[in-house]
Image (cartoon, helix red, strand yellow):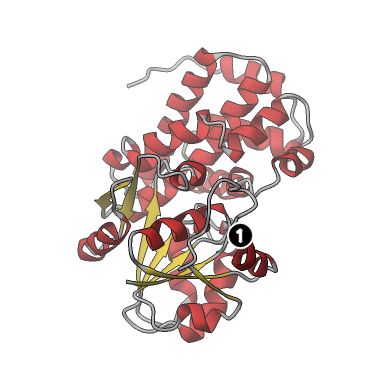
């Protein structure tokens, strides 16, 4: 297939390499200046051990990356998805399959990113959320991974499944797009909490509790929004949360760790050196909890620390001292 990728970050370039090696014709667009360096050096600075295949082409012209493609992949950070879709809108045709691999929720509208894309595009497009426990660093090295292709039209989900599946990437399908996207965005907040816990010096017990109870919070919200509970126990939910809350590759886990050690949030983000999507997702998560009356104490605890300068140890004390509850 002819595939256009909008965004030249770590995930976009790891997918570009993978898709090119699978025999597809891949072109990558970026609005930032690094596109010339990528074309010249064939190395993405945050993936220094990955060589970009010579067959992968680059462009600074968004009309070129959108034109005549079987698939378009949105791989820009969540806060740039709307602007990128608006810029691409004149060049996207009816029937185009669009795959979103960014993870987030728009704070102002509470739209998921596939909804943002559809809101900006005039064409009648088929939008797929591709999400799961897939760090770019490992996909770039052909390590075994699994991911979800989610679309309300199962046939389109299966088309994307066929394109992305190979000997190193196993792709499952799901029609619960909202559930998959909620998991993708909100697990980053729980990963921040897990990192903070480690930064404070707490152990595996605390991390396991945060992951488990964090997933319960996400699932509670998802059920209020009409999502399928099975989604939260699958790759997009439990799978992605585990890897994001425990891995050395996780920007959110790393950022949380630094905050737990006493760094200011802005300084922690600078030290990570890449986009920390969990920080961007907090306002939308809090707004969802307020709008739908969902109890999300871990999300609110992270919000208190990140956005309201609450003392992390005092927040932990408050969480541990909450009213007794039953798990079921």
299 vs 30, nearest the viewer: 30
The x and y percentages for residue 239 are: 38, 35
- The local crowd at label 1, few if under 14, some if 14 to 19, many if 20 or more residues have their Cα within 10 Å, is some
Location of the C terminus by quadrant is top left
What number of labels is visible? 1
30 vs 100, nearest the viewer: 30
Name of the residue lying farthest toward the left: 155
Element type where label 1 sits in the image: helix
The x and y percentages for residue 92 are: 43, 82
Task: State the image quarter where residue 76 is shown.
Answer: bottom right
The x and y percentages for residue 14 are: 48, 53
Is any atom of residue 157 visible in this view?
A: yes
Is any atom of residue 321 visible in this view?
A: no
Q: Which residue is labeled 1 in the image?
A: 79
The x and y percentages for residue 95 are: 31, 79
197 vs 138, nearest the viewer: 138
**Is residue 282 toward the left or the right of residue 66 in the image?**
right
The residue shown at (74%, 29%) is 310
Location of the N terminus by quadrant is bottom left
The residue shown at (38%, 44%) is 222
**Is residue 262 toward the left or the right of residue 29 in the image?**
right
The vertical placement of 224 against 260, above or below, is below
The residue shown at (53%, 40%) is 188
The vertical placement of 7 against 212, above or below, is below
């Amino acid at each position: 297939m002819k595939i256009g990728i909008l965004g030249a970050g770590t995930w976009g370039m790891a997918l570009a390499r993978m898709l090119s090696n699978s025999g597809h014709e891949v072109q990558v667009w970026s609005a930032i200046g690094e596109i010339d360096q990528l074309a010249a050096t064939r190395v993405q600075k945050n993936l220094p051990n990955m060589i970009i295949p010579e067959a992968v082409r680059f462009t600074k012209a968004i009309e070129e990356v959108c034109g005549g493609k079987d698939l378009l992949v949105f791989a820009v950070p969540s806060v740039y998805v709307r602007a990128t879709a608006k810029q691409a809108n004149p060049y996207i045709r009816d029937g185009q399959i669009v795959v979103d691999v960014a993870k987030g929720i728009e704070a102002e509208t509470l739209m998921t990113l596939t909804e943002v894309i559809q809101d900006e595009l005039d064409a009648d497009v088929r939008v797929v959320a591709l999400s799961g426990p897939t760090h770019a660093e490992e996909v770039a090295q052909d390590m075994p991974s699994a991911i979800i292709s989610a679309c309300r039209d199962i046939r389109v989900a299966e088309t994307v499944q066929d394109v992305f599946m190979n000997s190193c990437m196993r792709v499952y399908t799901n029609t619960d797009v909202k559930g998959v996207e909620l998991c993708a965005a909100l697990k980053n907040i729980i990963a921040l909490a897990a990192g903070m816990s480690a930064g404070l010096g707490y152990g595996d017990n605390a991390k396991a509790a945060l992951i488990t109870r964090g997933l319960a919070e996400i699932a509670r919200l998802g059920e209020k929004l009409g999502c399928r509970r099975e989604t939260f126990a699958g790759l997009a939910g439990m799978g992605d949360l585990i890897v994001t809350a425990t891995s050395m590759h996780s920007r959110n886990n790393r950022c949380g760790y630094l905050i737990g050690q006493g760094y200011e949030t802005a300084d922690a983000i600078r030290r990570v050196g890449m986009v920390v999507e969990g920080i961007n997702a907090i306002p939308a998560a809090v707004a969802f909890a307020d709008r739908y009356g969902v109890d999300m104490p871990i999300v609110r605890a992270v919000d208190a620390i990140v956005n309201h300068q609450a003392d992390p140890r005092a927040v932990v004390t408050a969480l541990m001292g909450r009213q007794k509850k039953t798990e079921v």
